[in-house]
Amino acid sequence: MKICVGLSGGVDSSVAALLLKQQGYDVFAMFMQNWHDADATLHGDCEWEEDKFVAEMVARKIGIPFYFVDLSKEYRQRVVDYMFDEYSKGRTPNPDVLCNREIKFDAFLRVAQKMGADMVATGHYCRVESMPSAQEDKKIYRILEGVDPGKDQSYFLCQLSQEQLSKAIFPIGGLLKKEVRAIAREADLPSADKKDSQGICFVGKVDLPTFLQQKLKSVEGDVVEVYPSFYEQDALYLKQCGIVRGMLRDDYAGRLPVISHYISEDKAATAEDARPFDDGKIASMSDDDLRTLSKPLSYGAIKFETETYRSGKKHVRKTRYKDNPLGKIVGRHEGAQFYTIGQRKGLNIGGHKDSIFVISTDIENNIIYVGEGHTHPGLSRLCLRVAPDEIHWIRPDLEMAVGEVRRCRVRIRYRQPLQSATLLRREDGLYIVFDNAQRGITAGQFAVWYADDGEMTGSGVI
């Protein structure tokens, strides 16, 4: 079997190539360039060139052919343009998920196949297994978490299809990171002590605001802090609280707060027999209640009126905003599209005891809404919805039917510990009701669900 390894210059893909070579496969390496614009990267154009140089040395050390392919055109069209479009709408895409679906296991795979490859291997920490299907001439491919819990990268592969998985090999998925390092050092690979990449795949560390400003204009707007008093009178929030109250187990009703956002991942019990919600009550929820519970809150009702006053000895007339019990303008920003839910860096807002987080962005009116502290009611949500056309089943044979309810473990971002949740398939999409409220649920990111044995079975865009 002939295998093409996507060699990035990092230790993980280097060891993947080494192991395949040692196992007797016909292996060749290919480095892909995805980006030409050095202005947006923090370290300039030399970063990818250095990675390519290290990758070439690794291939020479292992004794396998090395090739270079420029996929920057495909990457711009299928990943970067999508990113710009999503950010312009106030959504936060995940470029690494798209890179795997559109580039590594599509454009890159096709190039590798033209060069004679039967399979493509990468240095992802995950595993692929096959099993017989009902059709005798076909197999079902399962993708499972990597053995190293601190490095599992299955999340980034959540959009792959059965056809793509049938061509994929992940040689280090059954190893711990420290074992990979040890193998690289023992083989004296040039990448053995190379630090892990923190940037976008095969692009490098990107300064995101600079990157986005290539197409998205910077326009100053207000940063509005939302006070807890807002939630005491907001109709949607109060309705959500009522729905959550109706979901609680009878013996929990008097012991837990009835406000959904305060049943937090930090404080609520996580044991299956100590869950705050009743499975039967969740399963019987109406479509209207699920839609209501999944809606993000809107803060457009917070308005600021001005008043004039006289200041100083000369009684100069000035204008100021009247006090508003629901919120306050606390700063300025350079474009609401450059911020994401849960963000706390780059806000430059002082005078608070606890950290300030972005809780909502209004792209149309160019306003950022923020709240103080991890327990701010606007920072967490209990339920999210995936639209029907955004649901992706890695295992089509496990697709949920409309009306079906299923317990799963879910994550909404890379490296987030898996969260217990209930999935409900309805006509208007897939609803995910978490056992504990989740901080920073962000439109455009991927929700990914797993079975109890660590198999990733599906994903969807929030």
Image (tube, helix red, strand yellow):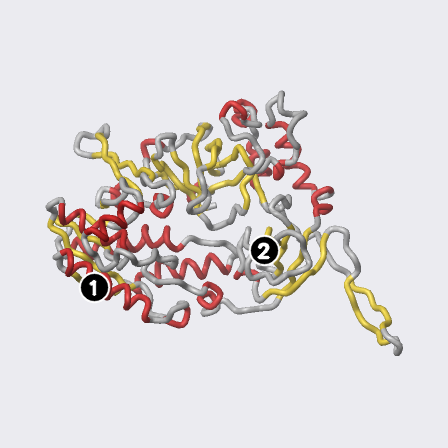
Q: Is residue 235 found left or right of 460 in the rendered image?
A: right
Viewer-side residue, 148 vs 117:
148
Q: Position of residue 299 (x, y in %)?
A: 66, 51
Q: Position of residue 234 (x, y in %)?
A: 70, 43
Q: Residue at x 47, y 68 (%)?
A: 210
- Mark 2 — residue? 361
Callout 1 secondary element = strand
Label at residue 81: none
Picture quadrant of residue 50:
bottom left
- Mark 1 — residue? 68
- Do we see residue 91 in this rendering? yes
Q: Is residue 248 found left or right of 454 in the rendered image?
A: right
- Do we see residue 170 in this rendering? no
From what the image shows, is residue 389 above or below residue 190?
above
3D distance between C-alphas at marks 1 and 2? 41 Å
Callout 2 secondary element = strand
